[in-house]
Image (tube, rainbow, N blue to C red):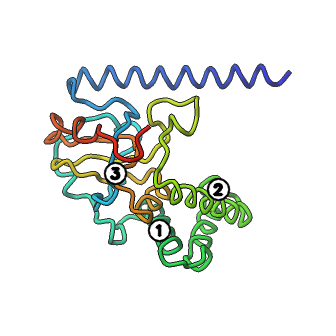
Amino acid sequence: MAALPNALHTAYRGVHFLSRVAMRDVSNMFVYGPHTPRMHERIWVDPQQCEAMNAGFHWDDFGKIRKGDWDIQSEPLTEEPRTQDSRNHWVKIQACLAHWNDGVSWEATGIYDHLLKLIKERGTADECKSIEDIINRYQKLDEIFHVVRNNQKLSSSAELSRIHFREAGGIVFHIDRNLRPIFGFWGCHRFAMAITVGLSSIPAQVGVVHDGAKDLWRNHFSISGPCAT
C-alpha cells in the first residue's frame, strides 16, 4: 500500500523539478539571449585544463551569463581556499589525490577526521552520520575509481541511469572569459578521479558563463572526447 503514495510523491517531485527548470530556462533566455546555458546542460570538459575553483555560485545562479571579474577572482586549485565552506570541499579533492596518486590510506589523509568534525557540527556530512558510514562511503568510492581507471572514462548521467535529466547531478564547471573551466565544487570525488586517471574529456553540467565567452562557449564545450556516449 505504501508503494502508491511513494510513487505519487516521486512523480510530484519530478514534475516540480521540471517545472522549475523550464521556468528558469525561459527566464534566462529572455534575459541573456539565445547563448545562455540551459539548466543542467551537458558540456564536455578537459579536467587537466582546470586550474581554478569558485564556490561563489549556487543552483539559482546556474544557467546565467555573468559580467564582472568573478572569473579572475576565482582561487587556484593548488592553494587552500580562503573560506571555510570552500575548504570543506577542497580537502576532499586533496584527500582523493593523496590516496589514489600516492597510496596514502583514507584515514591517513585526514578525511575521516574532517567528516567526523562536520558530522559533529551539522549532524550529517555527505550523507554520512557515523564513522561506519564514512568508511563504507570511501570503500565505494574506491570501487568506482577502479571502474573509471579500467574503462578510462567517467560515465554521463544518461549512461548511469535510464531516468535522468540532461546532466543533473554531474560535476559543475563554470566558464571564464577565456573559455577555461572553473571547478564549481560539485562532484569533488569524480573530479579528483578524472585528474588522477588523466582523462582528457569528461561529462559535466555547466554552471555560470562569463559574458566575454557567451558567443563561443557552447561550441567549445560541446565536443565530446573518448568518453562520448
Label 2 environment density (alpha carbons within 10 Å; few <14, some 14–19, many ≥20): some
In the picture of the structure, the residue carrying the numbered disc 1 is 91
Q: Amino acid at mark 1?
A: Val
How far apart in space, not on screen, are marks 1 and 3 (Cα)?
17 Å
Where in the figure is residue 206, as x and y percent of width and height? Answer: 34, 40
Q: Amino acid at mark 2?
A: Thr
Label 3 environment density (alpha carbons within 10 Å; few <14, some 14–19, many ≥20): few
Q: In the image, which is nearer the foreground, mark 2 or mark 1?
A: 1
Image quadrant in which you'd find residue 142: bottom right
Where in the figure is residue 177, as x and y percent of width and height? Answer: 16, 47
Left or right of 126? Residue 215 is: left
Question: Which badge, 1 or 3, is on the more N-terminal residue?
Answer: 3
Secondary structure beneath disc 1?
helix
Label 1 environment density (alpha carbons within 10 Å; few <14, some 14–19, many ≥20): some
Tell me which residue sits at (65%, 58%) in the image.
Answer: 140
* Residue 124 image label: 2
In the picture of the structure, the residue carrying the numbered disc 3 is 56
